[in-house]
Image (spheres, rainbow, N blue to C red):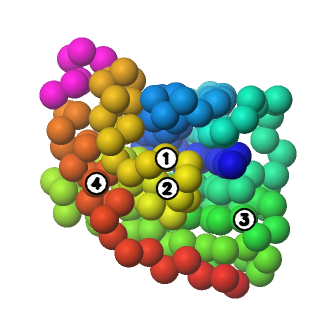
Amino acid sequence: MTTEIIFAGFGGQGVILAGKILTLAGMSEDKYVSHIPSYGAEMRGGTANCSVIVSDEEVASPVIEKPDVVVALNKPSMTKFEQWLKPGGLLIYNSSLIDIEPSRKDIRTLALPANEIAAETNNARGANMVVLGCLAKVCPGMISGVKPFEYALDEAISARNKKFNPINIATIEAAYNKDYDIKNI
């Protein structure tokens, strides 16, 4: 099992952090992982994306040419990275901020209201945590549930921000416990 994922959004949405947390969660389950962040020139408000690979086998190359999954948290990211998906791949897009439909007809799609789910858990800035819970649910075998994220958050979050870990875990868990409608276009 190897899953190649591109996370994309604007700076400040926690795209890079989500990739790092997924990578650490995979490591906690003895998976082979790769994480490559990419920032736009502006950082907060500019574009940000990262490539993540989670595998049961050694990762030969961290470069992703045709990802299995693209997570797009804003419209420019969906427009750009939808084209990268391999045929039959999964596009998870933040329907809270993206008001257009995917253009490709050879992929699967999931409209994820990430901001609304985060708000339900009183974690207004937690759309990235929603994505993690969703990925654990819709990509079985990649990460086994919510537990690996507890370890990952403890490793990834600085000491001064660890106080937010309980709400982040609650947000991941709320997203994991939702039912999702993946559309085959």
Stretch in magenta? 158-163
In the rendered structure, which disc, 3 or 4, sits on the residue that comes first in sequence?
3
Q: What residue type is labelled 1?
A: Ile
Q: Which amino acid does label 3 sit on?
A: Gly
Tag shown at residue 102: none
Residue 73 placed where, x, y %? Answer: 51, 55
Please, what secondary structure does the residue beneath circle 2 have?
helix
Residue that numbered label 4 is attached to: 173
Please, what secondary structure does the residue beneath circle 1 have?
loop
Q: Which amino acid does label 4 sit on?
A: Glu
- Name the residue rendered at 49%, 46% in the picture: 143
Residue that numbered label 2 is attached to: 135
Please, what secondary structure does the residue beneath circle 4 have?
helix
The answer to whether residue 161 is left or right of residue 25 is left
Residue that numbered label 1 is attached to: 143
In the rendered structure, which disc, 1 or 4, sits on the residue that comes first in sequence?
1
Residue 43 appears in the picture as rendered: no
How packed mark 3 is, by other alpha carbons closer than 10 Å (few <14, some 14-19, many 20 or more), is: many
The answer to which image quadrant residue 96 occupies is bottom left
